[in-house]
Amino acid sequence: MTDTTLRGHRDFVRFWAADTVSLAGTHITTLALRAVAVLTLGATATGVGLLEAARWLPYLLFGLLAGVVVDRRRRLPMLVGADFARAAVLALIPLLAFTGTLTMPSLIGLVVVFGTLSLFYDAAHQSFLPRLVPGARLVDANARIEQTRSVAQGVGPFLGGALVKLVGGPLAILVDAVSYLVSGLLLARLRTTEQLDPAPRRDLRGEIRDGLRWVYRHPVLRPLALTSHLWFLFTAVVTTCYSVLVLDVLGFDAFEFGLTFAVGGLGGLIGASLSGRAGRRFGVGPTILAGRWLTPVAYALVPLATSGASGFVLLCAAQFLFFLAIGLDGPVEMGYRQAITPDRMQGRMNATIRSVNRGVIVLGAPLGGVLADWVGLRTALWLAVAGLVGSAVAITASAAVRNAEV
């Protein structure tokens, strides 16, 4: 299927545009928050890990509840409301900074609120897409969104690094607040109708249990979910160590830090561009496996990096391969999950997998900081790479995943 066909779905185009705007801002803030923590507030590796964990703590606490709420309510109003609320929360960070009252505890608190809003947005976002395009086009629609995500992951930190260097982290975060406001206004223009499930509702516990059963008893979703939980755990360790290694130990500045993600964004764009064709030619399972194996290969380059030009090239290569892996397998996996799941279960399926994935970041991010402070950054990175290899071995051992097709 071509982009022209997708562009015939006007609400999908608006949805895609809103996603593009908010993602660009999000990845500016992702870098800006880390830079503010390390360069402005003097956070240690453990402090950076706690800040990263705060972003995902709500997924651990409220993730399963969010799935039930999304399946009980219309998803579009939830998307619009979450965007406007996130804009307001982020605007508080530069306000506190300009008044001289921004501290690590207040920054972490605001990030927890922001993460709670993002939890409900994400669950509704993934569950709303199947209403915008037919099932046969879900992989391509996810690929287009992943291409946008890849560009944002590259351009956002690049611009974020430049903004942090020029005007400081707080003003860079203000850009993201504006992006969420624009995204909400674009989503408010969607005209897709939503019909709620007329079936009688069960008790909250029963609905949560149904979502867990659907994911963890399905022959393909179960190994996909379990190995992705491990993947997120060990990539969270790397994320914490990477920030401190690049900005502190190796001495690269915020702009150079962002430049490594810009190269990564190019890899993600290429991976997402190839994803649909790879899935059709080689199959859903083999494409997912290829992405999972590329991750430890990519991150094995990070602990080899030094402060010189060759080290910087290794960091760029690592991000390029990492985001190539995400771009390649992400749309295929998401399209498969959406295609096989009934609409009445979309919210719980997405929220169950996503909340546990993000929940393990709450463990992995501080673990990365503690390991880095305890055994050293490079040793912690090698331990994470070993964990990612183990995750790749586990999913490869699943015959159901290897043979998965929509």
Image (spheres, rainbow, N blue to C red):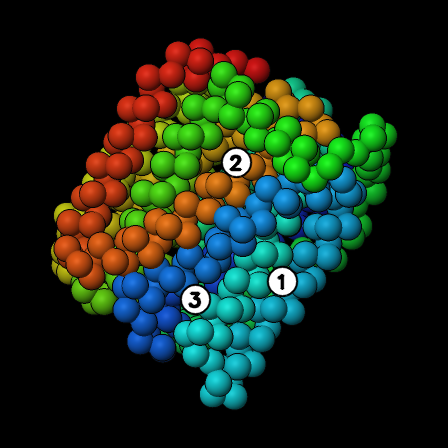
Does residue 41 show up?
yes
Q: Which residue is mark 2?
A: 353
Q: Is residue 271 visible?
A: no
Distance (Cα) linking label 3 and label 2: 26 Å
Q: Residue at x 25, y 31 (%)?
A: 389
Between the residue at mark 3 and the residue at mark 1, the CA separation in whole angstroms equals 15 Å
Element assignment for label 1: helix
Instruction: Give the mark nearest the N terminus, 3 or 1.
Output: 3
The three-letter code of the residue at mark 2 reads Ile
Label 1 Cα crowd, 10 Å radius (few <14 / some 14-19 / many 20+):
many
Question: Could you tell me which secondary element the residue under label 3 belongs to?
Answer: helix
**Of labels 3 and 2, the one closer to you:** 2
Eyeballing the image, is 406 above or below 266? above
In this view, the residue in front, 62 or 296, is 62
Q: Quadrant of residue 125?
A: top right
Q: Which residue is mark 1?
A: 86
Residue 384 image offset from top left, x and y in percent = 25, 43
Query: Which residue occupies 55% across, 57% down?
Result: 115
Residue kind at label 1, given as amino acid type: Arg
Dot 3: few (<14), some (14–19), or many (≥20) neighbours within 10 Å? many
Which x, y percent locates residue 79?
A: 70, 50
Residue at point 17%, 58% (across, down): 374
In the image shown, does 390 or 141 lie closer to the viewer?
A: 390
Give the labeled residue for mark 3: 33
In terms of secondary structure, where does tag 2 sit?
helix
Question: Residue at coordinates 30% horizontally, 49% vertically from top-left?
Answer: 237
